[in-house]
Amino acid sequence: MRLTVVVPTHGRRDLLDRLLASLREQRDAPAFDVVIVDDGVDPGLGEHVDAQGLPFPARVLHHETNRGRSATRNTGLAAATGDVVVFLDGDMRVCPEFLAAHAAAHATGDVVLGNIVTAPEIRRNAFVEYIDSRGVKKVAGGTEIPPRYFMTGNSSVARALTARAGGFDPEFDEYGGEDTEMGYRLAAHGARFAYAEHAVSWHLDLNSVPRMAERLRRYGERMLPILVRKVPQSYRELRLGLID
């Protein structure tokens, strides 16, 4: 098995450098390469990454203009050559067992959801506790993981499955909805979902409560109606868990 790690980025070299440093430290990982996609912000990023002398192949692709979250991941997906595509956000760092844990979980799943945790250097409070307990962790002990928990911040998908399901829908051009819709589409193509508890990524740039509230307001106004139109069953499933 070979992996391609796809990382969208939007102008935070400092955080991307921490992610790349953590990928240097991977233990017992299959062969992997990294595809970084800059969404129209940092045309000099390729030279910056090349200068780091990374011990794994890394390419930087650049959008001339900002094209949004879905299009950015699609660019990375189109460039992927691994058997499995690992999606990581650019404001994460990962544990040394991260890639090995994702690869191992593909013995039982076509789609693997990793364990996203707020970085320990961020002060703990009730909001952080909520963020760290939501999503797939609410159902990880069960026998079936609903597709609405698919999240591209830390996940991996068999590349052949993404080819059958198609890429991310570019109509989702702002925060929210694109990964949920993709999860339903992957399930419709027969995907088995698995949770890899030991594939830990630490989120380095936590939203404040006001910033998260504004994101959710815009999601509710703009992206959620698109999601419900494309996946009608999501209306029933999301009514009681809008920000799960």
Image (cartoon, grey):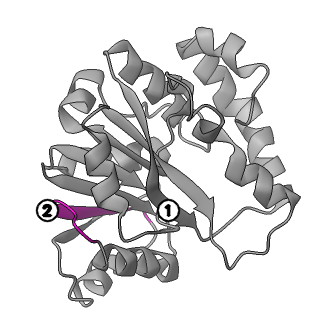
Magenta-highlighted residues = 27-40
- Identified at 37% across, 23% down, the residue is 186
Q: Quadrant of residue 121?
A: bottom right
Q: Is residue 110 above or below residue 55?
A: above
Looking at the picture, which amino acid does disc 1 mark?
A: Ser
Quarter of the image containing the C terminus? top right
Quick one: label 2, few (<14), some, or many (20+) residues within 10 Å? few
The percent coordinates of residue 102 (x first, y second) are 33, 50
Alpha carbon separation for disc pair 1 and 2? 19 Å
Q: Is residue 236 above or below residue 33?
A: above
Under circle 1, the secondary element is strand
The answer to whether residue 138 is left or right of residue 146 is right
User: Which label is found at residue 201?
Assistant: 1
The percent coordinates of residue 178 (x first, y second) are 51, 34
| Number of marks drawn | 2
- Identified at 49% across, 66% down, the residue is 10
Under circle 2, the secondary element is loop
User: Which label is found at residue 37?
Assistant: none
The percent coordinates of residue 157 (x first, y second) are 31, 38
Q: Which residue is mark 2?
A: 31
- Identified at 53% across, 23% down, the residue is 146
| Magenta-drawn stretch contains 33 | yes
